[in-house]
Amino acid sequence: MRYHKLLYRFVRFRKFLEKHFNSRGIILILSGLIGILGATAAVVIKNLLHLTSIAVSKIFAYSSIKYLYLIFPPIGILLTLLFVKKIVKDDLSHGVSIVLKSICKSDGKLRFHNVYSSMVASSITVGFGGSVGLEAPIVLTGSAIGSNVGRFFRMNSKHTTLLLACGSCAAMAAIFKAPIAALVFTFEVLMLDLTGSAILPLLISAITGTVMSLLFWGKTVMFTFDPTQTFLMGNIPLYIILGLLTGLVSVFFLRTSRWIDRQMKRVNNIYARAVIGSLMLCGFICLFPTFFGEGYDSVNAIINGDFTHLFANSPLSEFFQRPHALLLGVLGIFMLKVFATTLTTSSGGVGGVFAPSLFIGAFVGLFVALMAQQFLPWDVPTANFVLAGMAGVMTGIMQAPLTAIFLIAELSGGYTLLIPLMITATCSYISVYPFEKYSIYTYHLAEKDNLKTHNKNKYALRKLQWGKIIDTNILTIPIHSTLRAYTDLIARSKRNLFVVTDDSNHFEGLLVMDDHRPTIFDQSQYDTLLVEDLMIDPGEFIYDDDTAAEVLEKFNRTGNFNMPIITKDREYVGFVSKARFLAEYQSFIAADSED
């Protein structure tokens, strides 16, 4: 009954908006509403994680912590798997990739269960020690809120996608208290078109999400550091080295995660896969307890120079207390984190790579800082390099340098570090791009030719249905016809081009009237000259199953303005004009880009 009353009020609200506002005004109002809902979702997820962690920690109090590492991650992953397979019955594995896929393939439409399912699943996974983050599920939740609000208010695909982006922007702004980074993320990762009609709703959502976050959580920043550690010009070479190293570490992360995922999928039984993967995860957590959960506590600790708890409860804790062993331990942490993260998700856990990328980057930055402190006589501030390393790895894994720069600056309240962040992110991107053309979010979409957002021209060529512009009005003539039959055909046609076929309609050649003007007036040859003596071979054909990209490539290579279309068996289909093809292509692009 309450549900029906709530639905009735929403319907009345929709009718009110449709009566008093135009579509642009409705979008601005809805962007604020989505900002509130997206921020609320972020708060709910964080509170769910907090409640789960409290429940787990109470059990910790009665047992040896080392053994609990072998209990909780498998429990969390199995609970998540049961929730996803038995209740949700849909894929929740990669939140941002799901959002991108919805933009590319379903006009920004996300299923309603995405509003709550990723919240619950990720909270269970991370709360029980899964080595992933909550940010991608939060982005998916916010996007689903925006998408479903757009559908409820009967928006077209453009406006639904825009509201989806508003939800994503609001959720990210709320979880990080980083409105600028959230706005940049929308354009850089989701690749929403940067238009005037899109900026204002996104700004409203980002501001609303941030304000709601401040109301719930206050003004504290996620990472606290000493801002007196200023940027030194002498450290620029070190930031360049850090950027290049974070890029290579990102390549290692991307390729290793795909390899692990492929190996895990070889185990066909999903429950056996969950058990095997979660037990392997437990092994990594036992070696490096910092892999338990998101890992932000460890990041905050190393930013503030506290390394005492990094290896607590590890069987190797005594070894890492030896001189120079800390470097080896830090190296092990950022090299093995990819195994912990990918085993969590490939086993059935739900979570994202925001937190792991920041975690790995922090330890890469710490590694470079500790190495530099061993050999250089001047000050090498650990916190600065930790934060810059976070920006570097995030850039490499997500291929989003601007998002990484502004996110770390806003997370730490440290815009004084803008130059080091820019240097590191730029060098990271330079070192990643030759090896990895796609980010962790876009790789699988690009593999299946479904990546609309990052190259709209290529996407248009893949999706353009050029078959509807085939010209079938060009007349055909049998190959054994005489010149008389040819002249009769010319008299009946308004075209100067004709197709020669055999008795089974197989393509044999072309007749171009302009080439035969002297001949067609020579009546002495009307019954002796055959069209097969006059026809020409076009040399290049378009096949009826060619893609639009292949059609365009053939036009460009040959320089022809018209080309015949045949089947693989040379059966004649029709003609296609380059002018009509390009006009259709431009119309497709324009329809996809209009505000």
Image: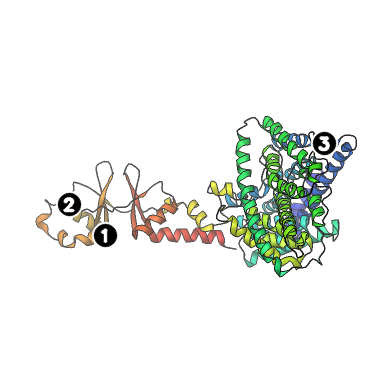
* In front of the other: 524 or 63: 63
* In front of the other: 58 or 588: 58
In the rendered structure, which amino acid carries the disc numbered 3? Lys
In the rendered structure, which amino acid carries the disc numbered 1? Asn
Question: Left or right: 34 with respect to 154?
Answer: right
Q: Residue at x 41, y 56 (%)?
A: 552
Asked whether residue 25 is in view, the answer is: no
Q: Secondary structure at mark 3?
A: helix
Q: Which residue is mark 1?
A: 496
Q: Marks 1/3: CA distance?
A: 85 Å
Query: Residue 328: x, y in percent?
Result: 73, 47
Q: Nearer the viewer, mark 3 or mark 2?
A: 3
Task: Tell me the tag on residue 533.
Answer: 2
| Mark toward the start of the polypeptide (1 vs 3) | 3
Q: Which residue is mark 3?
A: 66
* In front of the other: 479 or 554: 554
Label 2: few (<14), some (14–19) or many (≥20) C-alpha neighbours in 10 Å? few
In the rendered structure, which amino acid carries the disc numbered 2? Asp
Q: Quick check: marks 1 and 3 in contact, CB under 8 Å?
A: no
Q: Marks 3/2: CA distance?
A: 89 Å
Q: Quadrant of the N terminus?
A: top right
Q: Quadrant of the C terminus?
A: bottom right
